[in-house]
């Protein structure tokens, strides 16, 4: 951060400066961008954290390389590793974190323009963020279909197969069935492309729990206008956040970070109550 350049929109590049901006009503179109780091405290490992990340723990699946588990051509030859993982990650086992509830709180306050998530765990939905506010940029477990004939596959059936550690087959053509998670080698959902310029309409961007290494998602924060405040809540600095005139960094755990922000805005009790009721 070039400290000699003063902020243009905030009174200071601090949590207090940001809270003042929010409380004054100037942040009414907030875009939130999230990744695996907001779900680690729910018990779902991220990909890239050394030792605890999923990629570091995939050796037991006998993969040629870790990312193969989400590679569409590998999946066609060998769907078993993915389904082993799906068995572990399937929604229903995990509870949303207070960070998920914070996004819900922004929505309840009428401040959320859009949430872009890279996560496939559906925890934002479970926290009560409505469908029309969520762009699941990498798809999710919310729907599944045949990779050959594209026919949708019933949710009850996939649940049963995943629980029994079996590989589901299309009822129409016997093709492989896959949850509509975006694999390497597949297009992102239409909704991503339709909404990708929304950061330019926002008056605050909040980026949480992502390494911002996967494109095109990683380019979203860069779509914000010049002096729009951008907040990063993450264990490490990522994606050039901190270089903007009105960027604020809250480095550390995101649950701690959202609690600090909520407290500074006078929302902490409300947030904790909302989370407790989730
Ligand atoms: P990533 O590349 O694993 O990065 C995670 C980031 O979060 C890193 O910068 C970590 O330092 C940071 N982090 C981890 N834990 C915390 C924490 N408690 N508080 C603050 N920061 C933390 O994950 P990305 O999401 O950036 O990568 C994109 C991939 C990961 C997407 O395609 C996802 O589908 C995929 N993924 C999703 C899930 C899920 O749905 N929960 C789990 C694992 C991977």
Image (cartoon, rainbow, N blue to C red):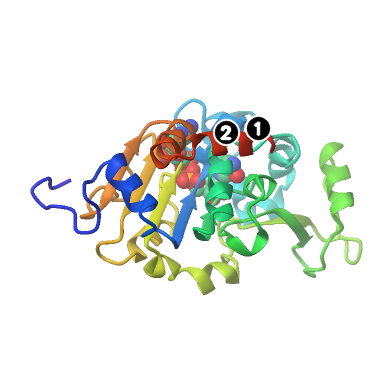
Residue 251 position by quadrant:
top left
Residue 164 in picture, x, y percent from top left: 87, 37
Residue 57 position by quadrant:
top right
User: Which residue matches tag 1?
Assistant: 276
Q: Count residues near mark 1 (Cα–Cα under 10 Å), then give few for <14, some for 14-19, many for 20+.
A: few
Between 156 and 87, the one lying in front of the other is: 156
Which residue of the protein is positioned furthest toward the top in this rendering?
A: 51
How many marks can you see?
Answer: 2
* Left or right of 1 in this view: 34: right
Residue 211 in picture, x, y percent from top left: 41, 44
Residue 96 in picture, x, y percent from top left: 64, 38
* Left or right of 271 in this view: 165: right
- Residue in the image at 71% along x and 47% along y: 78
* Left or right of 255 in this view: 240: left
User: Which residue matches tag 2?
Assistant: 272
Residue 227 in picture, x, y percent from top left: 25, 62
Q: Does the rendering let one see residue 195?
A: yes
Q: Is residue 21 above or below residue 162?
A: below
């Amino acid at each position: 951060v070039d400290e000699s350049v003063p902020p243009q929109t905030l009174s200071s590049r601090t949590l207090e400066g940001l809270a003042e901006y929010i409380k004054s009503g100037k942040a009414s179109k907030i875009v939130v961008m999230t990744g695996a780091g907001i779900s680690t405290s729910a018990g779902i490992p991220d990909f890239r954290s050394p030792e605890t990340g999923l990629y570091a723990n995939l050796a037991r699946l006998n993969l040629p390389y870790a990312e193969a588990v989400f590679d569409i051509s590998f999946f066609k030859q060998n769907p078993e590793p993915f389904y082993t993982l799906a068995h572990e990650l399937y929604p229903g086992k995990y509870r949303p974190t207070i960070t998920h509830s914070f996004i819900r709180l922004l929505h309840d306050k009428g401040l959320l323009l859009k949430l872009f998530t890279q996560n496939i765990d559906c925890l934002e939905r479970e926290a009560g963020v409505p469908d029309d506010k969520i762009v699941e940029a990498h798809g999710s477990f919310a729907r599944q279909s045949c990779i050959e004939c594209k026919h949708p596959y019933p949710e009850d059936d996939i649940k049963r197969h995943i629980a029994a550690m079996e590989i589901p087959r299309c009822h129409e053509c016997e093709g492989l069935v896959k949850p509509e998670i975006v694999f390497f080698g597949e297009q992102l959902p239409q909704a991503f492309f339709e909404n990708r310029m929304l950061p330019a309409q926002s008056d605050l961007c909040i980026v949480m729990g992502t390494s911002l290494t996967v494109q095109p998602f990683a380019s979203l924060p860069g779509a914000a206008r010049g002096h729009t405040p951008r907040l990063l809540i993450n264990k490490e600095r990522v994606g050039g956040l901190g270089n903007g005139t009105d960027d604020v960094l809250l480095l550390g755990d995101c649950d701690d970070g959202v609690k600090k922000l909520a407290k500074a805005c006078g929302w902490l009790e409300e947030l904790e109550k909302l989370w407790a009721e989730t």
